[in-house]
Image (cartoon, rainbow, N blue to C red):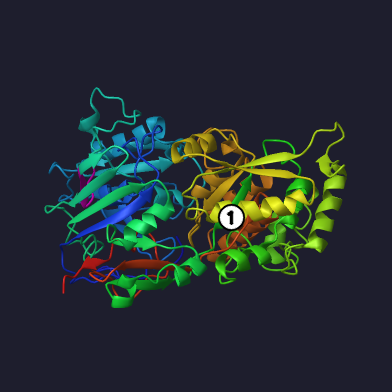
Amino acid sequence: MYGDPALPPDFVSLPYANPDAPKGGRVVFGNTGAFNSLNPFAPKGSAPWQMRFWGYESLMGRSQDEAFTLYGLLAESIEVPANRTWVEFTLRPEARFSDGSPVTVEDVIWSYETLASEGHVRYRRFGQQIDSITQTGPRSLRITFNQDNRELALIAGLRPILKKSQWDGKDFGEAALDQPPIGSGPYVVQDFEPGRFVTFARNPDYWAQDLPLRRGTNNFDEIRLDYYGDQTVLLEAFKAGEISAIREFNAAKWDKAYDFPAVASGDVVKSTIPNGKPSGMTGLGMNTRRAPLNDWRVREALIQAFNFEYMNDALTGGNQPRITSYFSNSYLAMRPGPAEGKVRDLLAPFAADLLPGTLEGYALPASDGTERNRKNLRRATKLMAEAGWTVVDGVMRNASGAAMELDVLLTPGNLGEGEMRAVVEIYARALERLGITLRADIVDSAQFVERQASFDFNLTFFRRALSLSPGNEQYLYWCSDAAEVERSRNLMGIADPAVDAMIDAMLTSVSQEDFIAATRALDRLLTAGRYVVPIWQYAEGRIAHIKEMRRPERLPISGDGIAFMPEVWWYDEQ
């Protein structure tokens, strides 16, 4: 996107992969909830989220050390003009699906068209940005875009490629359990039992195993996913030796709950993985489609009432810093104080409609650390009064006399069993002092997914991971067009022309300086929009794993993630 790729044309392997890693071994991971589909690309059903990464490939692949850089995977060469209005890919002649058949231009074009028309909603927008797809040679195709968007050439390289002939006479949109799509990735589904487990086997004839981008990766012979009702049961299964590795997100729990005998004996290893990624956003998302959450003053009052300092000390031992904005912990984050320079210039055309704090500077409230949090509750009461809500006989009511009662949609898997429930319980006690009733609505994972998809909630657990290369996915997360589209990822219903314009500015920037300014402006709009009650951030990953699971000493800049564990790990019986 900007400058040159970091790796030379003759690179041997990714810098954080071990090119000599041995192949072999079996590992077991745990998911919470259930699954009713093995098609991760269909609009219906719930498939194991890891499937997209283990079984399917794109024309290009990432290095986790670089933002906005891709390298050829299914494609052996890529051509783009200076204005990036089109991109042309030439397929590798050796590229194969898991059944041994070649990956063809016809498969690629069909995949783009089908995902855009029948696939999950996350694939739809890209299809709308394509003017034409044409075959230009026996192994090449050109995609021409209808928008000025410099990232589209990269996004085109990241669409999953599926086998066209598998779907002749079949409905791709159905979430079938008996027919996982055929991909070109290193793993295939070997066995499964609905809702209980899925077993993936490494394809010994995987076409790309000696490709530099893949050398030293995908080393386990078998990966099994077991499903558990909640995180507590999953942790107990790990302690019992039924699971090979587990990620822990709570710092206090990491210190206290992982002192079982296998850790003391060295049979289980605790690995901490730092990262340089943005914090992303984790917390309680507010549905602005519904009153009273469509009033920013009510949302700010709810944020004021959230006693982070007390809660963080009680639940994490005070070890996890608060998220201060969507891109905090990175150079893409908004700067403190008033907007300046290019950031201010980008926001200026929308100044009349910007919420307070956007231009002047916005920071989350801090409490004195005590449970009472009196100062911030007084601010919250004042804001509620400005919004037309007053306390009558201990109950917050509007001018019509209706009491303010809010539900929080949760499922047991949210940040571990009991953790988000504990957050909501403490929060509910604080809101009770304002005369507001807050109830936890805890449902199973299937109901949770469906109710989020239909925006059937007041508040809900919200987690959005963000990278150092934010781009087109920002439209899915925040743009106005997605606000009322069911199953879109714009959970809060953000519909702000300024937000849309900042995403446009990000994607049309020709210099890194302009891109950073646009991202910082977007960060201001989202943070000052008061759409989420933020909790703590995860500046490092925590993985507990059996001693036989090994990893390279050199870590990727992006830290832990699906492209780190299990991708570059291996099994060592010794």
Q: Tell me the element at label 1.
A: helix
| Count of number-bearing discs | 1
Q: Residue furthest front?
A: 261
Depth check: give the residue in front, 140 or 471: 471
Position of residue 261 in the picture relative to residue 275 (left or right): left
Name the residue located 61 percent from the left edge and 55 percent from the top edge.
423
Name the residue located 30 percent from the left edge and 31 percent from the top edge.
176
Q: In which quarter of the image is the N terminus?
A: bottom left
Q: Picture coordinates of residue 434 (x, y %)? A: 80, 50
Position of residue 52 in the picture relative to residue 537 (left or right): left
Q: Give the range drawn in magenta.
A: 183-190
Q: What residue type is labelled 1?
A: Ala
Q: Picture coordinates of residue 333 (x, y %)? A: 60, 65
Name the residue located 20 percent from the left edge and 31 percent from the top edge.
165
Can you say whether 393 is above or below 355 in the image? above
Q: Picture coordinates of residue 9 (x, y %)? A: 27, 68
